């Protein structure tokens, strides 16, 4: 399971790096599309790993991630339902704020996920040492 988590984490890190590197070539909206894919990937990852975060002592950080995710959703949802009610400048303002908060949330999750993987690796190593002494 740890190997799958490492693959998941480094895959997300690779996609985040590609997103940042593609800004000069695709512009911010192309990078925004890649950021959308990263957010979807992270949503699946966090749904599968929330229990592990809570049982490993990362309850507050993962709850903060969920609060940030819901805040991002609340920011973007009115654009879809009330698209004609917003002016072009207000719409762009909301989009830029959402892109910034989604990027922050993605970075926060990557950092948190990496810390979880390190903790699980350390526990596995310590369990192996204590078992070998018996």
Image (cartoon, grey):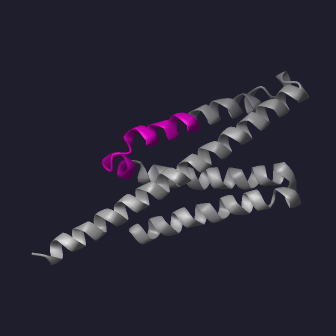
Q: Residue 69's quadrant in the figure?
A: top right
Q: Residue at image x 74%, y 58%?
A: 19
Instruction: Identify the residue at image location x=61%, y=52%.
Output: 40
Between 42 and 130, the one nearer to me in the picture: 130
Relative to 83, is 124 above or below?
below
Could you tell me which residue is drawn at 44 percent across and 55 percent down?
115
User: Farthest residue in the right direction?
Assistant: 88
- How far from the left and from the top, in percent, is residue 15? 67, 62
The quadrant the N terminus occupies is bottom left
Q: Nearer the viewer, residue 133 or 24?
A: 133
Range of magenta residues: 51-69
Eyeballing the image, is 69 above or below 114?
A: above
Q: Is residue 57 magenta?
A: yes
Magenta stretch prevailing secondary structure: helix
Residue 128, quarter of the rendered image: bottom left
- On-image quarter of the C terminus: bottom left
């Amino acid at each position: 399971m740890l190997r799958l988590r490492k693959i998941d984490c480094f895959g997300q890190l690779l996609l985040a790096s590609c997103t940042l590197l593609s800004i000069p070539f695709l512009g911010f909206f192309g990078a925004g599309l890649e950021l959308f894919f990263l957010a979807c990937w992270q949503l699946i990852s966090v749904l599968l790993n929330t229990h592990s975060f809570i049982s490993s002592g990362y309850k507050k950080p993962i709850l903060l991630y969920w609060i940030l995710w819901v805040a991002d959703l609340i920011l973007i949802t009115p654009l879809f339902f009330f698209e004609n009610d917003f002016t072009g400048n207000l719409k762009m303002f909301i989009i830029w704020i959402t892109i910034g908060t989604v990027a922050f949330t993605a970075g926060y999750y990557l950092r948190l996920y990496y810390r979880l993987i390190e903790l699980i690796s350390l526990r596995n190593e310590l369990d192996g040492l204590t078992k070998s002494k018996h």
